[in-house]
Amino acid sequence: MKFVRWFLGRVILLLNAVFTPKSMTRSALEQSEVNVAAEKLRLYQFDACPFCVKVRRSAKRLALPLKTLDAKKAEFEQELIQGGGKRKVPCLRIEKEDGHVEWMYESTDIIQYLEKRFA
Ligand SMILES: N[C@@H](CCC(=O)N[C@@H](CS)C(=O)NCC(=O)O)C(=O)O
């Protein structure tokens, strides 16, 4: 079972690499604003998790330089559990203007949020 999951994960990564989505283009000014906004976002994720791949592909389409953190590493796993409340990925950490932090789970919700904000 572990091997099957590992193997499927590799297939997902391979397909993702072969069929990489095209990034949208913006003016230099708009892109620099997106880059600044992206600094307040962190995606806690696993490399080969299909839901995480979905979110990363959405960020790629939106030309959003989204920083990813591997939640299999003890340090980031702890941050995720303490901040978000559970060890589940993907989870988007959103730092608001006023410093308040929101932890968003569910790939569909995350993608919807990113598209609403950056599309
Ligand atoms: N409905 C969730 C499913 C997320 C999910 O099942 N993630 C798995 C990894 S693929 C997970 O975090 N499992 C908990 C664990 O491995 O500890 C979504 O769309 O984000």
Image: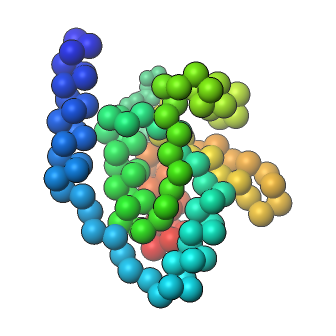
Render colour scheme: rainbow
Residue 83, compared with residue 115, is above or below; it is: above
- Is residue 78 found left or right of 15 in the rendered image? right
Residue drawn at 47 percent across, 37 percent down: 45
Residue 39 on image: x %, y %:
63, 59
Q: Residue furthest top?
A: 1
- Is residue 56 found left or right of 96 in the rendered image? left
Residue drawn at 60 percent across, 76 percent down: 33
**Front one among 58 and 31:** 31
Q: Quarter containing ligand 1?
A: top left
Q: Is residue 85 visible?
A: no
Residue 119 on image: x %, y %:
45, 73
Residue 35 on image: x %, y %:
57, 69
Residue drawn at 71 percent across, 54 percent down: 95
Q: How many marks?
A: 0
Report the quarter where the N terminus lies: top left
Residue drawn at 60 percent across, 31 percent down: 76
Asked where in the image residue 20 lies, by quadrant, the reply is bottom left
- Is residue 83 found left or right of 77 in the rendered image? right
Residue 47, compared with residue 42, is above or below; it is: above
Residue 31 on image: x %, y %:
52, 78
**Front one among 95 and 65:** 65
Q: Is residue 41 visible?
A: yes
Asked where in the image residue 5 lies, by quadrant, the reply is top left
